[in-house]
Image (cartoon, grey):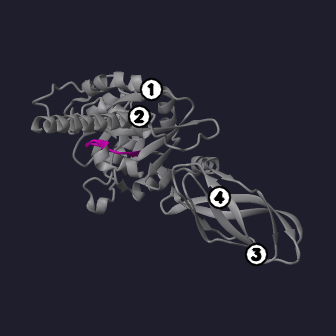
Amino acid sequence: MKTEYRLYRRLALVSFFMAISYFAISQISVRDEIAFPDIPGYVTLKCDFHIHTVFSDGDVWPTIRPEEAWREGLDAISITDHIEYQPHKDDLPTNHNRSYEIALPKSEELGLLLIRGAEITRDMPPGHFNALFLKDVNQLDVEDWREAIIAAVNQDAFIIWNHPGWRQPDEIPVWHDEHTEIFQKGWVKGMEIVNSSSYYPKAHQWCIDKNITMIGNSDIHNPVNLDYNIYKGEHRPITLVFAKTRTKDAIKEALLSRRTAVYHNNLLIGDEQYLSPVFYGSIKIMNREITIKEDQWKNIRIHNYSDIDLELEAGVNENNIVMQQKVTLAAHKTSLLRVQWKSEKLTGTKNIELLYTVTNFLIAPGKGLPVKLKFQANIIRE
């Protein structure tokens, strides 16, 4: 009897671990697409340009990074291990190209674009910089920070000032003389306005004033599921790149042309010329024609196809229309926006434009995106 019981327990344990293994494998094999529309003339690529592995101070082997990114719906990543900071160097050889070389076959297998990069790691000022599209990272391993940046520039790299609020009081970025030198010489063309959980409004404004490309990155060190509850809808910050094609060259061209937006929590941050088509491409008014009479409330049905809840706040509208002052267009759902007609003097067909601000689409610090919701009203009397 005891022998049969032990055999039953073993079979039960084997079955349990087989079920767990199957569940884990099935999760690895599923990709969750990030839903943002392509905009006219461009494809919208989802990118993270700041990632670490055990070849600097990260906690994962390089092949894990493309697997994580593929499952989360990303199109491109760059492994940017620190050049000057390698806490595992007693266990791993100092070859700054190695993490890219190890991750590349897995990236190609998954159809993920992997960009060769590295992080130049210096005290503030001038701070940390990611160099993307490198040919040989080892050439950046030099003592002087200027020589390191010049070595990246000589490889035609795209260079980003990382986390400009790093080690500053209240994480408020400070612009030093070294940064003036860097930007006047045209060495650095991008800036992280979001890094991990931090959004830097001051850096956001600098990007607008100085024509710097806006970047948002995870700066991930842990396995991604330790920092973000992916299965409950949390996501790493990413850069949306509006590229001509789905290629590395097209990503680089888009970065140089400042065609980016930053997706962070429930915020989308970028220039109005790109956020506007993202908004209109994300929604569909299901009933563009309504019949309404004085003092009657009617619902406008709006479907949001994107991953982000759209937070709308009413602007100044014509006197004949009363509308909801605030409405949330929930992601992947159809929401109702209530309107009321207040004039008995007008009848017939009228084209209506409702003026709103999308408060979580930031075109400048604290400034939302202005939009118009258009429909046709057939106005009748009793």
Numbered circle sitting on residue 371:
4
* Foreground pick, 291 / 2: 2
Q: Residues within 10 Å of mark 1 (few under 14, many from 20)?
A: few
Quadrant containing the N terminus is: top left
> Horizontally, is 226 left or right of 277 in the view?
left
**Residue 150 visible in the picture:** yes
Q: Amino acid at mark 2?
A: Trp
Q: CA distance from mark 1 to mark 2?
A: 8 Å
Report the mark closest to the observer, 2 or 3.
2
Q: State the residue position of label 1.
A: 111
Numbered circle sitting on residue 41:
none
185 over 342 or under it: above or below: above
The structure residue drawn at horizontal position 31% and vertical position 45%, both measured from the top left corner, is 225
Indicate yes or no whether the magenta region holds residue 208. Answer: no
Q: Amino acid at mark 3?
A: Asn
* Residue 119 drawn at (x, y percent): 28, 37
Whichever of labels 2 and 3 marks the residue nearer the N terminus, that label is 2
The structure residue drawn at horizontal position 46% and vertical position 40%, both measured from the top left corner, is 32
Q: CA distance from mark 2 to mark 3?
A: 50 Å
**Residue 85 visible in the picture:** no
Quadrant containing the C terminus is: bottom right
Q: State the residue position of label 2.
A: 70
Q: State the residue position of label 3.
A: 319
Contact flag, marks 2 and 3 (Cβ < 8 Å): no
* Foreground pick, 187 / 277: 277
